[in-house]
């Protein structure tokens, strides 16, 4: 008899974990929107943060995985899942390394939305990627395309800040903070290098997890009647 893998989309613990991720992400962003409306922050600025966008991607991903069964998803779905996982995990890492004040990195006195979107959700989605294997093997060559969104975001932020309203979402994108456009090479380069490395680490983990799950499933299944020698 075929033994089902424990951690699949159909497993109750996986569905419960993804519901928890979804509720956390929805509540955090709803709280953000409440604060935005109260503070008068322009929506064009709030929704321009990579953190907010990556968390919205997580919400869409969790809804997709909870509502659409694996067999109905397109072949490229695992790459979408991997890309969003990389974006949200790197959101947490970039915040901890570059954006957070030294006393914020390990502090628990920060507000809920900050903790949820920069700490809880990144590791929760990362754990989901680590423990629930992909349906298809991740292609590292195709994973290079995961960089398209971060690079597009970077270009759009610079075009907006340089040509439209002078607003930049993060200090490492602001030429005024670094003495001009030439001064952005190092801080922005660090972020891009982190994204390249992080994306291929996430893709590599997904590729290995697929292999392990396939071999484990094959080893766990005793030969059926069709494969038994007469």
Image (cartoon, rainbow, N blue to C red):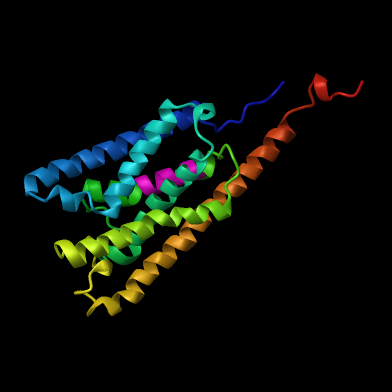
Residue 123 highlighted magenta (yes or no)? yes
Residue 153 highlighted magenta (yes or no)? no
Q: Total of numbered circles in the picture?
A: 0
Is 105 rendered above or below residue 118? Answer: below
Residue 111 left/right relative to 5: left
Image coordinates of residue 222 in percent, x first then y, are 77, 27
> Could one spot residue 174 in this view of the protein?
yes
- Quadrant in which the C terminus appears: top right
* 163 and 117: which is toward the camera: 163
Image coordinates of residue 167 in percent, x first then y, are 17, 62
> Could one spot residue 167 in this view of the protein?
no
Q: Main secondary structure of the magenta part?
A: helix
Q: Residue at x 34, y 35 (%)?
A: 22
Image coordinates of residue 60 in percent, x first then y, are 35, 37
Question: In this picture, which residue range is highlighted in magenta?
Answer: 121-129
Residue 43 left/right relative to 137: left
Q: Residue at x 55, y 40 (%)?
A: 134
- Quadrant in which the N terminus appears: top right
* 127 and 133: which is toward the camera: 133
Q: Residue at x 49, y 39 (%)?
A: 77
Image coordinates of residue 114 in percent, x first then y, are 25, 51
Considering every residue shown, the one lying at the far front of the view is: 163
Residue 5 left/right relative to 150: right
């Amino acid at each position: 008899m075929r033994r089902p893998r424990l951690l699949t989309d159909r497993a109750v613990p996986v569905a419960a974990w993804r519901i928890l991720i979804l509720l956390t992400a929805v509540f955090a962003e709803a709280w953000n929107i409440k604060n935005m409306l109260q503070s008068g922050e322009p929506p064009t600025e709030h929704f321009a943060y990579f953190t907010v966008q990556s968390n919205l991607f997580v919400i869409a991903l969790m809804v997709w995985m909870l509502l659409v069964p694996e067999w109905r998803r397109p072949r490229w779905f695992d790459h979408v899942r991997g890309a969003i996982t990389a974006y949200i995990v790197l959101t947490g890492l970039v915040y901890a390394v570059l954006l957070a004040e030294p006393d914020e990195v390990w502090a628990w006195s920060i507000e809920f939305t900050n903790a949820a979107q920069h700490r809880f959700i990144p590791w929760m989605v990362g754990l989901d990627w680590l423990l629930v294997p992909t349906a298809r093997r991740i292609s590292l060559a195709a994973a290079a395309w995961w960089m398209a969104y971060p690079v597009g975001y970077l270009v759009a932020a610079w075009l907006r800040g340089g040509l439209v309203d002078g607003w930049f979402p993060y200090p490492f994108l602001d030429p005024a903070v670094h003495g001009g456009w030439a001064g952005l090479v190092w801080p922005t380069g660090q972020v891009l290098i982190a994204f390249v490395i992080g994306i291929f680490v996430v893709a590599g983990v997904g590729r290995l997890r697929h292999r392990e799950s396939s071999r484990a499933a094959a080893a766990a299944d005793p030969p059926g009647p069709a494969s038994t020698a007469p």
